[in-house]
C-alpha cells in the first residue's frame, strides 16, 4: 500500500561543500547558497526511499517536484544530495518558471530543477511552438538542442493519427534563449508538407513569449489596375521593450516606389505613435478627369499620429493628427476611403464633480466640391461642467460653460461663449409614476466676421457682436408597468413631457453646429432638439410616447414610438422635411430584437404624420456566429429637405462570412447606392450604383494563414480610378514578428 507524502528538504550552507549544486553536465559546480540561505525543494510521490549513508532520495509513483518556480513531473526521481544531481525517468516533463516545458525519457537536472540534460527531448514553448530533438541541455534557462525540428503545427489530426506538419524547420542545432525571446538555428532547412524548399545556414525568429526582436514581417502582395503589382516588405526594428520602429518599402510596377515609416512608444505616462508614407509621382486633381496632360508630378504623402498621456489621476492629454498632400492620395494607394481628415489635441481634467476640456481641432476635406478655405480651425474649444455631489433644492444641479473660436482662411469667422445652469429633480408618486422637473437658463455671446462668405444665408447670422438669453422649464412623467409574460418579464412605459421656453433670438446668431437636424427617437424628448448650441427650440410643446419591452431567457425585444405637438402657432425654425416643421411632428420609433448571440436586428423609422409614408427607414441586422454570419445595413431617407447638406439618399450594405470547413472560410461585402431621382431630383444615378465590393477566401489553422481577396471600386476621383484590386497574404505563425 502506497501513501502520498509531502516533504520540504532544505540544502543549507551547513552541508559539506560536496553538497553544493552542480550544472547539468556536472563539470562546473554552481555557487553554494550564501550563509543563512536555503534552497527548498517541495515534492510529492506515492513512495519515498531515503538512504542516509549514500545521501540519496528516491521518489517513485506520480512524482511532483518544485523549486524556485521550476517544476518536474516523472514516474521516478532520484536525488543525490552529495552532488546535487537529480535524475528523472519515465514520462518526464520539466517546466521552467517562464512556462516552457521539456518532455523526455530521461532527464538529468541540478537540484535547482532549472539546468538539465535530456535525451529524446520535446520542448513545448509557452506560446505554443514545439521543438523535438535527439538530445538537449538547459543551462541558466538557455536550451541547446541537437538535430532538432521546430514547428507550431499539429503533428496529429483530428482523429488522433500522426500527420506531417504543414511546415517545419529542421536544423543541426537549435538554441532557445528566453532572455532574448528568440530561437536561433544553425544549418537549417525549411520544409512545407515534408518537401525541403530552402536551405538557411543561419536564421532566428521570436519565440512569441515577449517583446519581438528585429526582423522582416510578413510581406503583402497586391495587384491593381492603378498601381500594378505591389510588393511591401515591412521590417520591424525593436529599439527596446517600450518603443519600436517599422519601415516598409512599397514597390510597384506602374508607379515609383513609396516608403512607409511608423514609430511607436510607450512612455511612463502613456502610449503614442507617429507615422507616414511618401512617394514622388503624378497626380490628377480630383475635380478633373484623368485626361492626358492633366496630371502633374510632385511629392505625395500622408502623415498621421495619435497618443494619450495620463499626467496624474485627474489630468490627461490626447491627440490625433491626419494630413495628406492631396485629395486622392489615400484612395490611389489604398490607405483609406475617408473623405475628411480630422486632427485634434485635447487636455482634460476629470474630477469627481467637474470636467474640463481645452481642445483644438482642424479638418482637411478630400471631397471633390469642398473648398478647403471654408473648413474651420477650432482654437480654442473649451468646455467645463460642474455637478455638485450634494443635492441642491432637492435636485441635481449642473453648471456648464463653453467657449469656441472658429477661424477660416477663406470664410466666416465665429467666436462663441456661453454659460448655463440646469436643475433636475426626480420624484416617485405613490402609484409608481416617475416625475422629473427641469429648469434651465443660459446666456450666449457671439462675435462674427466675414459672414457674407457663407453661401447659405440661413447659417450666417448677423455681423458683429450678438447676445442671447435662453430659459426653459419642463415636466416629464413616465409610468413603468411591469408583469410576467411568456415565461419572462414585459414592461410598458407610457411617457409624456411638457416643455415651455420663451421666444429666442435665433436667426441673428450664426449656425455652425446645429445644421444636421432630424427628428429621431434619440432626440424626441430632448430639451432642445437641435444637435448643437447655435440653435434653440423655443415655444411650448407636448411630447408623448411609449416604450414596450419583453425579456425572456435568451430573447428580448424592445420598441419605442412617439410624437410631439407645438402648443404655439409661431412658424417653426426647423427646415422643411425634418419632421418638426408643422405643429404635429412626424412619428418616430425604434425596435430592437435580440436572440441569444445569434440574431440582432435594429430598426429605426420616421413616419409622415399625414399619410404614414416612410421618411426614414434604417435597418441594421446581424445573423449568425463569429465564424459564419450575415450582416445587412439599409438606409433610406425620403425627407424632401432642400438644404444641400441634408440631402436624401438610399443605400444598402451587405456582408457575410461562411466557415465551410474547419479552417476554410469565404467572405464578401458590398456597398450599393440606391439613390434615384425619387429621393434626390438632382442626382444622375439610376437607382443602382455599386460603390465597392469585395470577395475573399481565407484559410487559418494553428500555424498557417492564407488569404486572397478581390475588391472592385466603382468610383473615379482624379487619379484614383475605378479598378480591381487583388490582395494575397501568406503567414507562417510563430515565425513572423
Image (cartoon, rainbow, N blue to C red):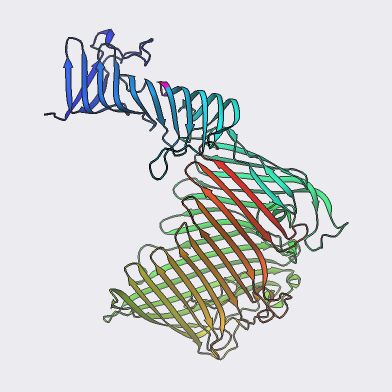
Q: Looking at this rendering, what residue extends furthest in the left direction?
A: 1
Q: Position of residue 520 (x, y in %)?
A: 52, 77
What is the quadrant of the C terminus in the image? Answer: top right
From the viewer's perspective, tell me whether residue 731 is left or right of residue 38: right
What is the quadrant of the N terminus in the image? Answer: top left
Identify the residue at horizontal 42%, vertical 77% (top origin): 559
Q: Position of residue 345 (x, y in %)?
A: 59, 53
Report the magenta stretch's main SS: strand
**Residue 416 in view, yes or no:** yes
Instruction: Find out whether residue 137 is within the magenta segment.
Output: yes
Q: Nearer the viewer, residue 438 or 79?
A: 79
Q: Position of residue 588 (x, y in %)?
A: 50, 80
Q: Nearer the viewer, residue 97 or 647?
A: 97
Q: Position of residue 98 (x, y in %)?
A: 39, 31
The span picked out in magenta is 135-141
Identify the residue at horizontal 24%, vertical 15% (top origin): 12
**Residue 522 in view, yes or no:** no
From the viewer's perspective, tell me whether residue 555 is left or right of residue 41: right
From the viewer's perspective, tell me whether residue 727 is left or right of residue 254: left
In the rendered view, would you say 551 is above or below 49?
below
Q: How many numbered circles does the render carry? A: 0
> Which corner quadrant of the image does residue 649 belong to?
bottom right
> Which corner quadrant of the image does residue 123 belong to?
top left
Amino acid at each position: 500500500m502506497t501513501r502520498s507524502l509531502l516533504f520540504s528538504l532544505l540544502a543549507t550552507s551547513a552541508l559539506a561543500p560536496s553538497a553544493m549544486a552542480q550544472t547539468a553536465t556536472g563539470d562546473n559546480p554552481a555557487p553554494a547558497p550564501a550563509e543563512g540561505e536555503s534552497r527548498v525543494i517541495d515534492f510529492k510521490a506515492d513512495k519515498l526511499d531515503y538512504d542516509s549513508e549514500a545521501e540519496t532520495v528516491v521518489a517513485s509513483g506520480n512524482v511532483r517536484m518544485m523549486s524556485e518556480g521550476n517544476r518536474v513531473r516523472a514516474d521516478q526521481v532520484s536525488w543525490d544530495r552529495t552532488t546535487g544531481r537529480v535524475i528523472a525517468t519515465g514520462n518526464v516533463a520539466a517546466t521552467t518558471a517562464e512556462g516552457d516545458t521539456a518532455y523526455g525519457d530521461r532527464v538529468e537536472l541540478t537540484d535547482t530543477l532549472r539546468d538539465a540534460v535530456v535525451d529524446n527531448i520535446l520542448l513545448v514553448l509557452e506560446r505554443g511552438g514545439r521543438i523535438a530533438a535527439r538530445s538537449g541541455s538547459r543551462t541558466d534557462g538557455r536550451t541547446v538542442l541537437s538535430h532538432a525540428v521546430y514547428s507550431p503545427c499539429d503533428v496529429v489530426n483530428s482523429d488522433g493519427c500522426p500527420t506531417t506538419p504543414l511546415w517545419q524547420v529542421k536544423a543541426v542545432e537549435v538554441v532557445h534563449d528566453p532572455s532574448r525571446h528568440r530561437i536561433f538555428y544553425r544549418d537549417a532547412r525549411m520544409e512545407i508538407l515534408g518537401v525541403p524548399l530552402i536551405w538557411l545556414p543561419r536564421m532566428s525568429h521570436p519565440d512569441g513569449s515577449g517583446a519581438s526582436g528585429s526582423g522582416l514581417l510578413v510581406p503583402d502582395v497586391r495587384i491593381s489596375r492603378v498601381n500594378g503589382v505591389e510588393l511591401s516588405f515591412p521590417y520591424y526594428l525593436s529599439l527596446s521593450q517600450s518603443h519600436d520602429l517599422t519601415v516598409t518599402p512599397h514597390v510597384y510596377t506602374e508607379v515609383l516606389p513609396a516608403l512607409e515609416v511608423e514609430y511607436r512608444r510607450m512612455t511612463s505616462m502613456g502610449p503614442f505613435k507617429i507615422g507616414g508614407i511618401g512617394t514622388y509621382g503624378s497626380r490628377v486633381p480630383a475635380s478633373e478627369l484623368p485626361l492626358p496632360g492633366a496630371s502633374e508630378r510632385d511629392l505625395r504623402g500622408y502623415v498621421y499620429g495619435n497618443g494619450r498621456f495620463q499626467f496624474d489621476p485627474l489630468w490627461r492629454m490626447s491627440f490625433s493628427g491626419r494630413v495628406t498632400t492631396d485629395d486622392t492620395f489615400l484612395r490611389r494607394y489604398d490607405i483609406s476611403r475617408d473623405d475628411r481628415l480630422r486632427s485634434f489635441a485635447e487636455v482634460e481634467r476629470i474630477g469627481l464633480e467637474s470636467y474640463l476640456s481645452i481642445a483644438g481641432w482642424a479638418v482637411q476635406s478630400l471631397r471633390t466640391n469642398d473648398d478647403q478655405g471654408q473648413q474651420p480651425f477650432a482654437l480654442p474649444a473649451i468646455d467645463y461642467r460642474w455637478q455638485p455631489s450634494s443635492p441642491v433644492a432637492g435636485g441635481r444641479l449642473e453648471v456648464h460653460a463653453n467657449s469656441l473660436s472658429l477661424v477660416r482662411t477663406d470664410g466666416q469667422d465665429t467666436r462663441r461663449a456661453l454659460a448655463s445652469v440646469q436643475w433636475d429633480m426626480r420624484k416617485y408618486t405613490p402609484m409608481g409614476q416617475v416625475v422629473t422637473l427641469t429648469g434651465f437658463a443660459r446666456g450666449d455671446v457671439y462675435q462674427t466676421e466675414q459672414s457674407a462668405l457663407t453661401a447659405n444665408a440661413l447659417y450666417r447670422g448677423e455681423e458683429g457682436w450678438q447676445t442671447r438669453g435662453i430659459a426653459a422649464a419642463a415636466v416629464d412623467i413616465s409610468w413603468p408597468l411591469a408583469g410576467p409574460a411568456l415565461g419572462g418579464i414585459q414592461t410598458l412605459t407610457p411617457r409624456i413631457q411638457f416643455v415651455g421656453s420663451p421666444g429666442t433670438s435665433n436667426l441673428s446668431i450664426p449656425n455652425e453646429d446645429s445644421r444636421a437636424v432630424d427628428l429621431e427617437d434619440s432626440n424626441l424628448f430632448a430639451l432642445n432638439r437641435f444637435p448643437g448650441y447655435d440653435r434653440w427650440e423655443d415655444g411650448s410643446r407636448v411630447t408623448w410616447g411609449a416604450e414596450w419591452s419583453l425579456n425572456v431567457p435568451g430573447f428580448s425585444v424592445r420598441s419605442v414610438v412617439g410624437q410631439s405637438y407645438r402648443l404655439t402657432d409661431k412658424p417653426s425654425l426647423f427646415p422643411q422635411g425634418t419632421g418638426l416643421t408643422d405643429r404635429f411632428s412626424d412619428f418616430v420609433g425604434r425596435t430592437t430584437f435580440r436572440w441569444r448571440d445569434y440574431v440582432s436586428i435594429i430598426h429605426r423609422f420616421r413616419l409622415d404624420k399625414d399619410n404614414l409614408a416612410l421618411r426614414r427607414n434604417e435597418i441594421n441586422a446581424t445573423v449568425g456566429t463569429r465564424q459564419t454570419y450575415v450582416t445587412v445595413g439599409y438606409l433610406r431617407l425620403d425627407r424632401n429637405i432642400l438644404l444641400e447638406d441634408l440631402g436624401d439618399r438610399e443605400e444598402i450594405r451587405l456582408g457575410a462570412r461562411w466557415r465551410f470547413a474547419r479552417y476554410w472560410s469565404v467572405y464578401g461585402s458590398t456597398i450599393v447606392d440606391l439613390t434615384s431621382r425619387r429621393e434626390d431630383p438632382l442626382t444622375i444615378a439610376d437607382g443602382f450604383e455599386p460603390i465597392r465590393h469585395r470577395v475573399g477566401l481565407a484559410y487559418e489553422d494553428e500555424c498557417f494563414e492564407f488569404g486572397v481577396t478581390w475588391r472592385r471600386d466603382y468610383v473615379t476621383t482624379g487619379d484614383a480610378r475605378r479598378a480591381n484590386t487583388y490582395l494575397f497574404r501568406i503567414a507562417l505563425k510563430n515565425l513572423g514578428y
